[in-house]
Structures are given as C-alpha cells and as structure tokens.
Image: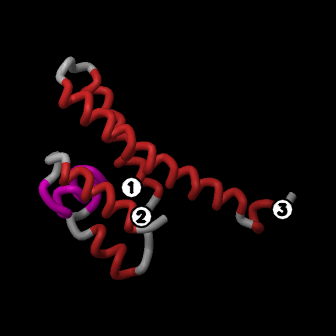
Amino acid sequence: MSVKLLEHLRDELISCGVVQNTPEFCRAWLGRSEGYIRTLRNHGTGPSVETLTVCSHKLGHYRDRLRESDDGEHMRLAEHFERLKVLCDSAIARHAEAVWRAPERMRA
C-alpha cells in the first residue's frame, strides 16, 4: 500500500472542508500522530491495515450520519465519503489477499 492513497484521502477531505491540513488529518482520521504521513514517506513504507481500517470506519460512520439528513450538501458529502471508503476498503482487501497468497502461506 502506498502513502499516495493517504495523501489522496487527505487532499479530498481538505477540498471538502472536512480537515484543514495534514496534521489534523493524521490525528482525526487516521488515529495517528501528526507526522504519520511524513514518517511513512521518510521510511519508504505504506500505511498499516489498521490505519486504513480506522479511516474506512470513520468515513462509513459519517457517511451514514450524513445520509440521515435531507440536506443536499450532506448527501453529496455522504457520497464523497462512500467513494473514499471504497478506496480504503480496496487497499485493505489487496493487502489481505497478498498476505494469504504469499507462497509461504500457500503450502499445505
């Protein structure tokens, strides 16, 4: 998994006015320290499945709350959250499949 996914999620949430900057995104949407993305980039690693799961769950939670409203802007934001949640869930699924398909795990 790539840090680019987190950067995309962050940029989308900033463009929606949900977060203002990277430190806020890392703390509020990933449950990590404000320097999480910078640390991943410096180490050349990607986000953990746990981090993506936290973000996906929060997106789903607020998507559901926004769908309870009759406000058109809330509905638009709910659909945007749904698209971002799908990105998180797809990355989680790809990682899970890579783990169970690893040759050392495929032995009988």
Three-letter code, disc 2: Pro
| Residue 7 horizontal side relative to residue 48, left or right | left
In the picture of the structure, the residue carrying the numbered disc 1 is 51
> In the structure shown, which secondary structural element does the residue marked by tag 3 occupy?
loop
Distance CA(mark 3)–CA(mark 2): 28 Å
Other residues around mark 1 within 10 Å, as few (<14) / some (14–19) / many (≥20): some
Does the residue at mark 3 contact the one at mark 1 (Cβ under 8 Å)? no
- Whole-number angstrom distance, CA of label 1 to CA of label 2: 6 Å
Q: Residues within 10 Å of mark 2 (few under 14, many from 20)?
A: some
Position of residue 73 relative to residue 4, above or below, is: above
Is 44 displayed left or right of 63 in the figure?
right
The image shows residue 49 at horizontal and vertical percentages of 47, 56
SS for dot 2:
loop
Report the disc number at residue 66. none
Q: Position of residue 44 (x, y in %)?
A: 42, 79
In the rendered image of this protein, does residue 42 appear above or below residue 22? below
- Tell me the residue at 72%/59% (across/down): 101
Residue 16 vs residue 31: left or right?
left
| Label 1 SS | helix
Q: Quadrant of residue 5?
A: bottom left
Q: Earlier in the sequence, mark 3 or mark 1?
A: 1
Residue plotted at (32% across, 27% down): 64
Q: Position of residue 13 (x, y in %)?
A: 23, 50
What residue appears at the point 35 percent right and 48 percent down from the top-left corner?
A: 55
Q: Which residues are magenta?
A: 20-32
State the residue position of label 3.
107
